[in-house]
Image (cartoon, rainbow, N blue to C red):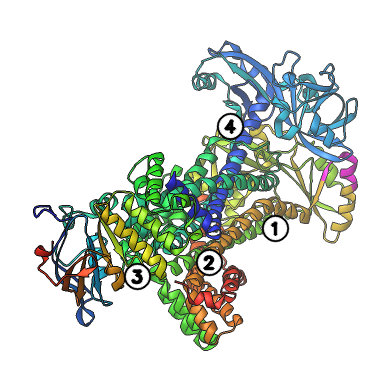
């Protein structure tokens, strides 16, 4: 990776506080993080460590109490709600633990939805949705409703929905959390494959085996980065400085 | 396309919710559509009836009081610029005497060259009029009386009865369509003989040149007509019916406003719940890039779709409902209305109040849903309190309450212009109820607490859990309670008003019609207030019958007072006018003295409209020109909606050239009423007359009101139906939200029966919370409506709160709540425990 390539995500001094008074919890306490393009970064940590909060803030689903977030060079905190939504629609793909597909729509319709709401004609959206479904190995399942599919298939539909917009950044929040071992591994392999095709992925997980498939593991504790290691060929490297690692 | 599919799928996925929402829209639209259609149909029917009757005539010359006059008195009308043709006719009412009894018919007599609509009607049997002893009837009317061509029939008028032969039957078009075919065509000469009016006519019909300004011609004619004759557009005769119908129309319009308000809040309630269920789905949309505006549009599109479907179904239901209501109107008016007048206005109203009501009711929840941060809903976090939604509706409620309060004061103080007074009751009622519903979230917690305190000792753990669940969703609960409250308020207020008014009409009939028997040719209709006249000579014949104490004569005369169409009640009185007038003045004696001195006694409605009081002057257009009479006082009167003037018959006879009597009022000597009844029955049967006992007359009034009043009760019941839809919605949502709780309760202790009670207690809580505010508001509104009756209709009706009626309404309120809870309660009690425990 060339040293002057701008990062896909650049986070500085990120803070997020929930509650007030005696219920106050500092979910993130000054996180700095850069993610280079075409990298697969896994965020790990115990429950309440702030890993999901970090992902939600990067997705623009929540607002921080301090710090900055740049996605593809865009300061998302400087954007209003509509512009953040547009950024999410056009530059970010989201994958959730609970799949979050719309039950009333077929797989193909679910996948094409971000394109349709962006004003892309139905025919074009459907064509691209079919391509995205083919990418995740579900070319023949496009007309099926979510309830007619297995958990692993539903998660692949969700990944196809995230990919269909050709996002700069794919954010995955415990994407294997609701899946059995076999389907979980298949999903991780799929994500790994996407990175090989140039996709940038930020994934939150508590599964070390799945995290090991990433290029880099960032570990959070009490809202702070306590470990940040680069993996190569499945062997962890020693903790290195952030910029050096990149 | 995909979003459209999503919208459709969402509606289909929850058929119960969708149907309930549709139900709210359908009832609102059906109410508005049916009422607008029937009001239009009734008004148009009168206009069309007279238009058909006069056919081509743009104007007509008639005598003041509608009697006969020499055609030559009007001068050479054809010479007036703009007048193309002048045709003298006799158009007046007679009784057709057949084996089935007397029937009131309009007799239309035209000269041999008379150009009316009659000859244009297609003859379906027999031939056209060829002799003066022939008549033509309308086919369907003749068939209903079992009369065919060549049959011999008698027509009875003030000049006596004459026999005619049926020459031909016409199809019911043009003039032959008048009042469902209740019209008889004769030659002008025959009509003059029948009514004892040699050389006279009752109208000269005028055709105007094409493009000529009718108003200018009317003005020119009015300038040259002699005193006693007047020029008018034929359709203005329908004005009498409109006077009679005003109060009914206002009652119906007010109830249609109520059905809209209730329907709108069921939709609002329904959407609030639907959005509650779909938070996660909407959050997913937001997460993948759907903007707030797009979410709002998506939800509004759903509402619009429902509104359009609801409008279509509502129009169909409204059409059926309007048939029912038209039947009631026919009974009230005593005329046969033609088919529905499908004008544009009811459809426009349906379009505004169907999709419009759905979109308006959804706007606030849709905006609110779009504003929600998606993360909380995606993660399933519990909602934080204080979302600010209640403050805005409360503020709007306060503003609407203030505006409606100000308008009510202005209305009661008579500060509003007349045109506004006529149209304001329905929107005012709507505004008042909307304000009440919007303020309900502020009032509900207190009502709920009071109910909980009151019933704590009685309803055990199920009751306590029920109250807690209701309080957990205070906004939704308060809106549901408010819709139930609206139903209660409307039923108490309208019901109390109807009961007070019916009571007053019945008491009025008892006070003013004290005669034991009424002898008349036919029953009059409410629109004309005119039946066929009987010969005056009958007075002496009746007075000579054994057992008769006294006979009084009564005529209904169409006249104009201060430019306004009025009915003159020309009546003979005894010296004390005993049992004749329902005097609304402190000094009854002075009123009677004035009457005998030739003064007028006016109905309270007329007094209200013209701002007249005892001692004022009233200008009447009479056969002798304009005559100004002193107003002796006011009376409660329901004939022609109270737009009536009483004159002593001798005075009226002179002013309006009355010849004949509409009704003979016969009083029996003490103890002779029964035997007199038998004698009079024989007398009337022999002459083909109609005899009504006092009880039969009052029963007839009761029946006339029955149709429309029955419809009003039906509409009020529909408001309860709408409220029950809201309750089903709310309780179903509560059950869905409590799924896991219910499963826990079932798994640790509760039987199905107890779970049912848990839901039924929620319904009971809703019902009881509505009772106190609903009853109080209902009685206040009933009192205000009673006061406004004086301003709107001019009728002074005593306000009497009927405790039993109010209790029955409260009972209906609780019964509605419990009945509506049955389905949700059943659903809750049948939940599969294991699945329910895993419910998210």
Q: State yes or no: residue B177 in magenta.
A: no
Residue drawn at x 86%, y 46% as measured from the top left: B544
Of B138 and B26, the residue lying toward us: B26
Q: Which residue is mark 1?
A: B510
Marks 4 and 2 share the same chain: yes
* CA distance separating discs 1 and 3: 65 Å
Give the numbered dot on residue B236: 4
Give the CA separation, mark 2 to mark 1.
Answer: 45 Å
**Chain identifier of the residue bearing label 1 in the image:** B
Query: Which residue is nearer to you in this view: B807 or B353?
Result: B353
> Are labels 1 and 4 assigned to the same chain?
yes
Q: Is residue B684 magenta?
A: yes
Q: Earlier in the sequence, mark 2 or mark 3?
A: 3
B132 vs B774: above or below:
above
Quadrant in which the N terminus of chain B appears = top left
Numbered range of the magenta stretch = B682-690
Residue to which mark 3 is pinned = B383
How packed mark 2 is, by other alpha carbons closer than 10 Å (few <14, some 14-19, many 20 or more), is many
Per the image, label 1 sits on a secondary structure element best described as helix
Q: Residue at x 63, y 31 (%)?
A: B48
Q: CA distance from mark 4 to mark 3?
A: 64 Å
The answer, for residue A197, to whether it is visible in the render is yes
| Element assignment for label 3 | loop
């Amino acid at each position: 990776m060339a040293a002057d390539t701008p990062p896909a995500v650049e986070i500085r001094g990120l803070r997020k506080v929930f509650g007030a008074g005696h219920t106050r919890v500092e979910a993130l306490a000054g996180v700095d993080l850069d993610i280079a393009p075409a990298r697969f970064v896994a965020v790990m940590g115990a429950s309440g460590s702030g890993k999901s909060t970090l992902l939600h803030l990067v997705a623009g689903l929540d607002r921080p109490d301090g710090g900055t977030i740049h996605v593809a060079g865009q300061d998302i905190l400087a954007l209003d709600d509509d512009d953040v939504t547009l950024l999410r629609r056009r530059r970010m793909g989201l994958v959730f633990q609970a799949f979050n597909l719309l039950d009333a729509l077929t797989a193909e319709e679910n996948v094409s939805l971000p394109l349709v709401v962006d004003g892309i004609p139905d025919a074009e959206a459907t064509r691209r949705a079919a391509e995205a479904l083919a990418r995740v190995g579900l070319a023949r399942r496009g007309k099926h409703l979510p309830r007619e599919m297995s958990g692993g298939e539903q998660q692949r539909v969700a990944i196809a929905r995230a990919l269909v917009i050709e996002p700069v950044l794919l954010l995955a929040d415990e994407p294997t959390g609701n899946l059995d071992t076999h389907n979980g591994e298949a999903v991780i392999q799929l994500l790994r494959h996407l990175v090989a095709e140039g996709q940038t992925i930020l994934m939150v997980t508590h599964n070390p085996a799945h995290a090991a498939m990433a290029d880099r593991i960032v570990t959070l504790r009490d809202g702070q980065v306590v470990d940040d290691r680069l993996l190569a060929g499945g062997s962890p490297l020693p903790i290195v400085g952030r910029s050096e690692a990149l | 396309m995909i979003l459209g599919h999503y919208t459709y799928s969402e509606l289909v996925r929850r058929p119960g919710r969708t149907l309930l929402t549709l139900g709210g829209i359908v009832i609102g639209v059906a109410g508005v559509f049916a009422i607008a259609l029937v009001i239009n149909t009734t008004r148009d029917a009168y206009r069309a009836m007279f238009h058909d009757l006069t056919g081509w005539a743009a104007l007509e010359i008639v005598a003041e009081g509608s009697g006969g006059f020499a055609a030559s008195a009007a001068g050479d009308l054809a010479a007036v610029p703009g007048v193309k043709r002048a045709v003298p006719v006799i158009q007046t009412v007679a009784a057709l005497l057949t084996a089935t009894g007397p029937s009131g018919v309009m007799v239309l007599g035209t000269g041999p060259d008379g150009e009316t609509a009659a000859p244009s009607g297609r003859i379906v049997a027999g031939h056209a009029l060829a002799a003066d002893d022939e008549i033509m009837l309308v086919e369907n009317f003749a068939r209903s009386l079992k009369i065919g061509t060549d049959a011999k029939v008698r027509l009875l008028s003030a000049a006596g009865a004459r026999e005619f032969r049926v020459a031909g039957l016409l199809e019911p078009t043009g003039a032959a369509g008048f009042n469902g075919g209740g019209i008889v065509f004769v030659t002008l000469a025959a009509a003059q003989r029948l009514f004892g009016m040699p050389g006279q006519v009752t109208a000269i019909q005028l055709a105007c040149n094409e493009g000529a300004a009718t108003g200018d011609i009317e003005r020119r004619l009015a300038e040259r007509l002699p005193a006693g004759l007047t020029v008018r557009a034929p359709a203005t005769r329908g004005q009498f019916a409109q006077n009679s119908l005003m109060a009914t129309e206002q009652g119906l319009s007010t109830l249609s406003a109520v059905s809209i308000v209730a329907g709108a809040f069921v939709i609002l309630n329904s959407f609030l719940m639907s959005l509650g269920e779909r938070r996660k789905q909407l959050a997913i949309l937001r997460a993948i890039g759907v903007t707030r505006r797009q979410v709002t549009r998506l939800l509004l599109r759903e509402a619009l779709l429902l509104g359009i479907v609801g409008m279509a179904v509502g129009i169909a239901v409204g059409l059926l409902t309007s048939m029912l209501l038209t039947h009631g109107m026919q009974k009230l008016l005593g005329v046969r209305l033609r088919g529905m007048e499908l004008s544009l206005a009811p459809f426009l109203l349906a379009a505004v109040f169907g999709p419009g009501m759905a979109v308006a009711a959804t706007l606030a929840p849709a905006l609110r849903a779009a504003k929600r941060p998606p993360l909380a809903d995606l993660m399933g976090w519990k909602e934080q309190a204080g979302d600010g939604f209640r403050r805005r509706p409360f503020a709007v409620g306060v503003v609407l309450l203030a505006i409606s309060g100000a308008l009510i004061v202005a209305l009661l103080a008579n500060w509003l212009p007349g045109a506004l007074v006529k149209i304001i009751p329905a929107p005012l009622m709507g505004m008042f109820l909307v304000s009440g519903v919007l303020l309900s979230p502020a009032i509900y917690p207190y009502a709920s607490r009071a109910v909980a305190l009151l019933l704590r000792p009685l309803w055990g753990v199920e009751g306590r859990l029920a109250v807690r669940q209701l309080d957990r969703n205070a906004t939704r609960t308060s809106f549901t309670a408010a819709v139930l409250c609206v139903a209660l308020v409307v039923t108490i207020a309208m019901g109390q008003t109807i009961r007070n008014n019916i009571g007053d009409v019945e008491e009025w009939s008892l006070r003013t019609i004290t005669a034991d028997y009424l002898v008349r040719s036919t029953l009059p209709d409410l629109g004309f207030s005119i039946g066929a006249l009987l010969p005056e000579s009958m007075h002496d014949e009746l007075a000579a019958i054994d057992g008769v104490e006294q006979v009084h004569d009564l005529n209904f005369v169409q006249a104009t007072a201060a430019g306004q169409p009025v009915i003159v009640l020309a009546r003979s009185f005894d010296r004390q006018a005993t049992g004749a007038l329902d005097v609304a003045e402190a000094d009854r004696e002075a009123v009677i003295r004035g009457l005998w001195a030739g003064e007028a006694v006016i109905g309270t409605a007329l007094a209200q409209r013209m701002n007249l009081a005892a001692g004022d002057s009233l200008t009447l257009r009479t056969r002798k020109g304009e005559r100004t009479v002193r107003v002796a006082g006011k009376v409660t009167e329901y004939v022609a909606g109270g737009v009536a003037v009483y004159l002593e018959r001798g005075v009226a006879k002179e002013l309006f050239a009355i010849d004949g009597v509409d009704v003979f009022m016969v009083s029996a000597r003490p103890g002779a009423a029964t035997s007199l009844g038998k004698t009079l029955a024989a007398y009337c049967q022999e002459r083909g007359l109609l005899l009504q006992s006092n009880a039969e007359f009052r029963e007839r009034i009761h029946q006339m009101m029955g149709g429309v009043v029955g419809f009003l009760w039906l509409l009020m019941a529909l408001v309860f139906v709408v409220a029950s839809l809201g309750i089903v919605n709310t309780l179903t949502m509560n059950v869905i939200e409590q799924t896991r709780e219910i499963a826990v309760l079932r798994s640790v202790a509760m039987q199905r029966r107890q779970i049912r009670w848990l839901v039924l207690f929620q319904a009971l809580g809703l019902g009881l919370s509505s009772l106190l505010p609903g009853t109080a508001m209902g009685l206040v509104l009933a009192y205000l409506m009673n006061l406004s009756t004086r301003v709107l209709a001019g009728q002074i009706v005593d306000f009497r709160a009927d405790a039993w009626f109010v209790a029955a309404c409260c009972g209906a309120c609780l019964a509605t709540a419990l009945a509506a809870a049955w389905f949700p309660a059943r659903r809750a009690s049948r939940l599969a425990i294991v699945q329910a425990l895993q419910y998210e």
